[in-house]
């Protein structure tokens, strides 16, 4: 209900929150309730593990300072589909994603490649990539690619959702707003298309309370507009 009320306010409709609640109840509309997350982390005890450079502090002052990564799974009629996301912590914008029928290191690497290609982070600028201790993120291929891109790795502890809370929050929203709401799912192509639609909506239209009830893309645009204003005034 809160999101509907915020959206109406953005569109210029002066309506009380209690009125929105009453109308939604009368039409049989209710908000989405997120379920409990399931564990997908399979630790690789043999792989060297980077230090935790984030320490549960997911607020950063600018884009391309901290990316958080995780993946979740979707049950389909043809088996599980795994969906990986990379999120820029500044405005919670999804900067990379990939769906796969196998939870190998390659599919999370594909999500990273998309993020690197689209965001083009400056090497040595201090961008940190944070994940859990899943074997996919500790693989040689993945850690080498981080190094090539000049991105510093950071890893939380196994099974502790608080150490990668932001990524798990996005996973939870994805499951609640897409997977549980629109299932059952027949095959991977349906999941991919739905994820593509959701990521576009999430980045450009979904209102997020932690960033001021505006979409992630708008929050980033505001940041860069403020920088330009400062440069012109200097």
Image (cartoon, grey):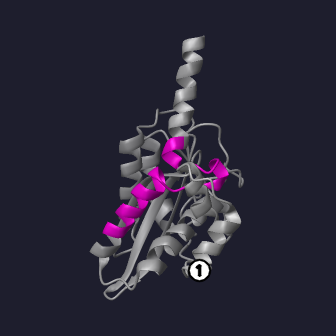
Dominant secondary structure (helix, strand or loop) of the stretch shown in magenta: helix
Q: Is residue 63 above or below residue 30?
A: above
* Rendered residue at 56%/25% (across/down): 227
Q: Residues within 10 Å of mark 1 (few under 14, many from 20)?
A: few
**Looking at the image, residue 167 lies above or below residue 194:** above
| Most foreground residue, 3 or 162 | 3
Q: Which residue is mark 1?
A: 26
Is 12 rendered above or below residue 120?
A: below
Q: In the rendered structure, does residue 212 fall within the stretch colored magenta? A: yes
Residue 116 or residue 148, whichever sits in front:
116
- Residue at coordinates 65% horizontally, 42% vertically from top-left? 60
x 68%, y 63%: residue: 17
Depth order, front residue of 180/135: 180
Q: Is residue 213 magenta?
A: yes
* Residue 89 in view, yes or no: yes
Q: Position of residue 87 (x, y in %)?
A: 51, 53
Residue at (65% x, 54% y) in the render: 209
Give how far across and how far down residue 100 sits, in percent. 34, 71
Position of residue 229 relative to residue 40, above or below, is above
* Residue 107 seen anywhere in this rendered image of the structure: no
* Image side of residue 118 versus residue 29, left or right: left
Provide residue 63's location: percent of width, then percent of height. Answer: 55, 39
The residue lying furthest to the top in this view is 234
Residues rendered magenta in the picture: 193-218
177 sits to left or right of 35: left
Quadrant assignment, res 30: bottom right
Q: Position of residue 214 (x, y in %)?
A: 57, 48
Quarter of the picture holding the C terminus: top right
Quadrant assignment, res 15: bottom right
Left or right: residue 136 versus residue 156 is left
Q: Is residue 191 left or right of residue 12?
A: left
Q: Locate the N terminus by quadrant.
A: bottom right
């Amino acid at each position: 209900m809160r999101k509907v009320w915020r959206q109406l306010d953005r569109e210029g409709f002066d309506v009380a929150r209690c009125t929105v609640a009453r109308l939604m109840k009368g039409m049989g509309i209710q908000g989405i309730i997120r379920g409990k997350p399931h564990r997908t982390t399979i630790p690789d005890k043999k792989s060297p593990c980077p230090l935790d450079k984030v320490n549960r502090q997911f607020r950063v002052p600018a884009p391309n300072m901290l990316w958080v990564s995780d993946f979740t799974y979707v049950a389909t009629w043809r088996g599980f589909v795994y969906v990986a996301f990379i999120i820029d912590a500044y405005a919670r914008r999804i900067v990379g994603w990939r769906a796969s029928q196998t939870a190998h290191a390659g599919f999370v690497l594909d999500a990273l490649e998309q993020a690197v290609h689209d965001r083009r982070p400056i090497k040595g600028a201090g961008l940190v990539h944070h994940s859990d201790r899943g074997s996919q993120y500790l693989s040689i291929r993945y850690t080498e690619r981080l190094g090539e891109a000049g991105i510093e790795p950071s890893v939380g502890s196994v099974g502790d959702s608080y150490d990668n809370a932001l990524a798990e929050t996005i996973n939870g929203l994805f499951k609640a707003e897409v997977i549980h709401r629109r299932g059952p799912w027949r095959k991977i192509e349906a999941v991919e298309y739905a994820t593509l639609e959701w990521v576009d909506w999430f980045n450009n239209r979904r209102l997020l309370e932690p960033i001021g009830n505006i979409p992630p893309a708008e929050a980033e645009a505001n940041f860069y507009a403020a920088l330009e204003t400062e440069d012109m005034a200097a």
